[in-house]
Amino acid sequence: MNKKILWDISYGVYVVSSLDKEKPTGCIINTAVQLTENKIGVCINHNNYTNSIIKENKNFALTILSEKTNPDIIATFGFASGREKNKFDGFEYKMFDNLPVLLNSKGYIALKLVQAVELETHTFFIGEIIDGDVFNDEIPMTYKYYHDVIKGRAPKAAPTYIAPEDLNEAKPMGKRFRCKVCGYIYEGDIEKEPPNFVCPVCKQPKSVFEEILYA
Protein backbone atom coordinates (compact mmCIF):
# COMPACT_ATOMS: atom_id res chain seq x y z
CA MET A 1 0.00 0.00 0.00
CA ASN A 2 1.15 3.53 -0.76
CA LYS A 3 0.58 5.10 2.65
CA LYS A 4 1.14 8.57 1.22
CA ILE A 5 -2.50 8.54 0.04
CA LEU A 6 -3.46 9.11 3.69
CA TRP A 7 -1.87 12.56 3.45
CA ASP A 8 -4.59 13.49 0.96
CA ILE A 9 -7.25 13.26 3.65
CA SER A 10 -7.88 16.80 4.86
CA TYR A 11 -6.06 17.60 8.11
CA GLY A 12 -5.13 20.68 10.11
CA VAL A 13 -2.19 21.32 12.44
CA TYR A 14 -3.03 21.96 16.09
CA VAL A 15 -1.59 22.12 19.59
CA VAL A 16 -3.59 20.30 22.27
CA SER A 17 -2.74 21.57 25.74
CA SER A 18 -3.59 21.12 29.40
CA LEU A 19 -2.00 21.68 32.82
CA ASP A 20 0.43 19.35 34.56
CA LYS A 21 -0.39 20.70 38.04
CA GLU A 22 0.89 24.27 37.49
CA LYS A 23 3.08 23.56 34.45
CA PRO A 24 1.51 23.98 31.00
CA THR A 25 2.09 21.14 28.57
CA GLY A 26 0.89 20.15 25.12
CA CYS A 27 1.62 18.40 21.85
CA ILE A 28 1.10 18.73 18.10
CA ILE A 29 -1.76 16.78 16.53
CA ASN A 30 -3.38 16.69 13.10
CA THR A 31 -6.52 14.72 13.94
CA ALA A 32 -9.25 17.02 15.23
CA VAL A 33 -12.87 17.05 14.10
CA GLN A 34 -16.11 18.79 15.05
CA LEU A 35 -18.52 15.96 15.87
CA THR A 36 -21.65 17.92 16.82
CA GLU A 37 -22.58 21.52 17.47
CA ASN A 38 -20.81 21.48 20.85
CA LYS A 39 -18.50 18.42 20.70
CA ILE A 40 -14.99 18.11 19.25
CA GLY A 41 -12.82 15.02 19.05
CA VAL A 42 -9.01 14.83 19.04
CA CYS A 43 -6.71 11.83 18.72
CA ILE A 44 -3.49 11.55 20.78
CA ASN A 45 -0.92 8.75 20.93
CA HIS A 46 -0.79 6.71 24.15
CA ASN A 47 2.90 7.58 24.54
CA ASN A 48 2.34 11.34 24.48
CA TYR A 49 2.60 12.90 27.93
CA THR A 50 -0.34 15.16 27.11
CA ASN A 51 -2.52 12.06 26.83
CA SER A 52 -2.12 11.21 30.53
CA ILE A 53 -2.51 14.84 31.62
CA ILE A 54 -5.85 15.22 29.82
CA LYS A 55 -7.11 12.03 31.49
CA GLU A 56 -6.07 13.43 34.86
CA ASN A 57 -7.43 16.98 34.43
CA LYS A 58 -10.54 16.17 32.36
CA ASN A 59 -10.08 19.25 30.18
CA PHE A 60 -7.96 20.50 27.29
CA ALA A 61 -7.55 23.32 24.78
CA LEU A 62 -7.29 22.97 21.00
CA THR A 63 -5.11 25.74 19.56
CA ILE A 64 -5.45 26.18 15.80
CA LEU A 65 -2.11 27.04 14.18
CA SER A 66 -1.91 29.37 11.19
CA GLU A 67 0.37 29.58 8.17
CA LYS A 68 2.19 32.42 9.99
CA THR A 69 2.73 30.45 13.20
CA ASN A 70 6.39 30.28 14.22
CA PRO A 71 7.74 26.91 12.92
CA ASP A 72 9.68 26.60 16.20
CA ILE A 73 6.32 25.89 17.86
CA ILE A 74 5.89 22.81 15.67
CA ALA A 75 9.47 21.72 16.36
CA THR A 76 9.04 22.08 20.14
CA PHE A 77 5.53 20.72 20.57
CA GLY A 78 5.97 18.00 17.94
CA PHE A 79 9.43 16.63 18.69
CA ALA A 80 10.08 17.25 22.41
CA SER A 81 8.52 15.68 25.51
CA GLY A 82 6.61 17.56 28.19
CA ARG A 83 8.00 15.06 30.69
CA GLU A 84 11.43 16.63 30.26
CA LYS A 85 10.80 20.33 29.63
CA ASN A 86 8.26 23.12 29.75
CA LYS A 87 7.39 23.42 26.07
CA PHE A 88 5.76 26.79 26.59
CA ASP A 89 9.02 28.43 27.69
CA GLY A 90 10.00 31.06 25.14
CA PHE A 91 6.55 31.29 23.55
CA GLU A 92 3.86 33.84 24.34
CA TYR A 93 0.79 32.22 25.84
CA LYS A 94 -2.21 33.06 27.99
CA MET A 95 -4.49 31.13 30.30
CA PHE A 96 -8.08 30.80 29.12
CA ASP A 97 -10.52 28.81 31.27
CA ASN A 98 -7.48 27.61 33.26
CA LEU A 99 -5.93 26.18 30.08
CA PRO A 100 -2.67 27.33 28.39
CA VAL A 101 -3.13 28.70 24.87
CA LEU A 102 -0.41 29.82 22.44
CA LEU A 103 -1.07 33.35 21.19
CA ASN A 104 0.96 32.91 17.98
CA SER A 105 -1.98 31.08 16.40
CA LYS A 106 -5.32 31.48 14.67
CA GLY A 107 -7.33 30.96 17.85
CA TYR A 108 -8.42 28.34 20.35
CA ILE A 109 -11.26 26.21 21.65
CA ALA A 110 -11.48 25.22 25.34
CA LEU A 111 -13.07 21.83 26.08
CA LYS A 112 -14.27 19.71 28.98
CA LEU A 113 -13.53 16.01 28.56
CA VAL A 114 -16.71 13.95 28.29
CA GLN A 115 -15.44 10.66 26.84
CA ALA A 116 -12.15 8.89 26.07
CA VAL A 117 -12.20 6.03 23.56
CA GLU A 118 -9.12 3.78 23.65
CA LEU A 119 -7.83 2.68 20.25
CA GLU A 120 -4.87 0.42 19.46
CA THR A 121 -2.21 3.14 19.60
CA HIS A 122 -4.18 6.32 20.37
CA THR A 123 -6.90 7.73 22.60
CA PHE A 124 -9.79 9.53 20.93
CA PHE A 125 -10.80 12.30 23.34
CA ILE A 126 -14.27 13.82 22.98
CA GLY A 127 -14.66 17.24 24.54
CA GLU A 128 -17.60 19.56 25.13
CA ILE A 129 -16.92 23.14 24.04
CA ILE A 130 -16.60 25.57 26.95
CA ASP A 131 -15.30 28.64 25.17
CA GLY A 132 -13.19 29.80 22.22
CA ASP A 133 -11.96 32.81 20.31
CA VAL A 134 -10.43 33.94 17.00
CA PHE A 135 -7.22 35.96 17.39
CA ASN A 136 -6.72 37.18 13.81
CA ASP A 137 -7.64 36.68 10.15
CA GLU A 138 -4.66 34.47 9.30
CA ILE A 139 -5.14 31.32 7.21
CA PRO A 140 -5.27 28.11 9.31
CA MET A 141 -2.34 25.79 8.64
CA THR A 142 -3.27 22.58 6.85
CA TYR A 143 -1.27 19.38 6.93
CA LYS A 144 -0.67 19.77 3.19
CA TYR A 145 0.84 23.22 3.81
CA TYR A 146 3.02 21.74 6.54
CA HIS A 147 4.35 19.06 4.17
CA ASP A 148 4.57 21.11 0.95
CA VAL A 149 5.70 24.52 2.19
CA ILE A 150 7.38 23.98 5.56
CA LYS A 151 8.71 20.60 4.33
CA GLY A 152 7.89 19.07 7.69
CA ARG A 153 7.63 15.41 8.62
CA ALA A 154 5.07 13.81 10.93
CA PRO A 155 6.29 12.86 14.43
CA LYS A 156 6.48 9.11 15.01
CA ALA A 157 3.48 9.33 17.37
CA ALA A 158 1.25 10.85 14.67
CA PRO A 159 -1.40 8.70 12.95
CA THR A 160 -0.05 9.88 9.58
CA TYR A 161 3.61 9.01 10.29
CA ILE A 162 5.35 7.24 7.43
CA ALA A 163 8.92 6.00 7.76
CA PRO A 164 11.22 7.84 5.32
CA GLU A 165 12.21 4.58 3.62
CA ASP A 166 8.53 3.91 2.83
CA LEU A 167 7.83 7.20 1.05
CA ASN A 168 8.79 5.96 -2.43
CA GLU A 169 10.30 9.34 -3.25
CA ALA A 170 12.81 9.94 -6.03
CA LYS A 171 16.37 9.40 -4.84
CA PRO A 172 18.97 11.64 -6.47
CA MET A 173 22.60 10.56 -6.40
CA GLY A 174 25.00 11.97 -3.83
CA LYS A 175 25.28 12.05 -0.05
CA ARG A 176 22.24 12.34 2.18
CA PHE A 177 21.68 12.34 5.92
CA ARG A 178 18.61 11.58 8.03
CA CYS A 179 17.66 13.24 11.31
CA LYS A 180 17.23 10.45 13.85
CA VAL A 181 14.67 12.52 15.76
CA CYS A 182 12.14 13.55 13.11
CA GLY A 183 13.23 11.74 9.93
CA TYR A 184 14.06 14.87 7.92
CA ILE A 185 16.31 14.07 4.95
CA TYR A 186 19.24 16.39 4.25
CA GLU A 187 20.41 16.11 0.64
CA GLY A 188 24.14 16.80 0.35
CA ASP A 189 27.10 16.75 2.73
CA ILE A 190 25.91 17.95 6.13
CA GLU A 191 29.50 18.08 7.36
CA LYS A 192 29.92 21.25 5.31
CA GLU A 193 27.29 23.00 7.43
CA PRO A 194 28.50 25.24 10.29
CA PRO A 195 28.66 23.80 13.85
CA ASN A 196 25.47 25.65 14.84
CA PHE A 197 23.40 24.04 12.06
CA VAL A 198 20.10 22.58 13.29
CA CYS A 199 17.45 20.42 11.67
CA PRO A 200 14.92 22.75 9.99
CA VAL A 201 12.04 20.62 11.27
CA CYS A 202 12.83 19.61 14.87
CA LYS A 203 15.72 22.03 15.62
CA GLN A 204 18.09 19.29 16.79
CA PRO A 205 21.86 19.73 16.18
CA LYS A 206 23.58 18.12 13.23
CA SER A 207 25.12 15.55 15.59
CA VAL A 208 21.77 13.66 15.51
CA PHE A 209 22.02 13.15 11.73
CA GLU A 210 23.19 9.84 10.31
CA GLU A 211 24.35 9.19 6.77
CA ILE A 212 22.08 6.89 4.80
CA LEU A 213 22.82 5.04 1.59
CA TYR A 214 20.67 4.91 -1.52
CA ALA A 215 19.19 1.53 -2.28
Image (tube, grey):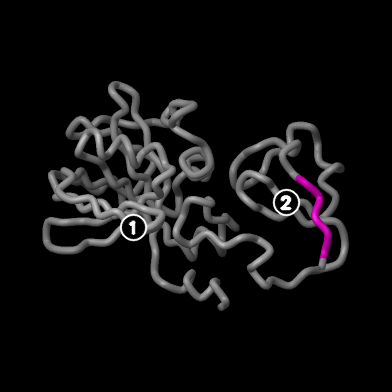
In the image, 1: left or right of 28?
A: right
In the image, 83: left or right of 55?
A: right
How far from the left and from the top, in percent, is residue 94? 29, 30
Above/below status of 114 relative to 32: above
* Badge 2: residue crowd in 10 Å (few <14, some 14–19, many ≥20): many
Residue topped by disc 1: 119
Residue topped by disc 2: 178
Residue at point 42%, 47% (across, down): 28
Whole-number angstrom distance, CA of label 1 to CA of label 2: 30 Å
Residue at point 86%, 56% (across, down): 175
Location of the C terminus (image quadrant): bottom right
In the image, 136: left or right of 152?
A: left
How far from the left and from the top, in percent, is residue 86? 44, 26
Q: Amino acid at mark 2?
A: Arg
| Label total for image | 2
Above/below status of 136 relative to 143: above
Any part of residue 101 in sight: no
Give, as a single range, the part of the protein colored magenta: 210-214
Above/below status of 31 relative to 82: below
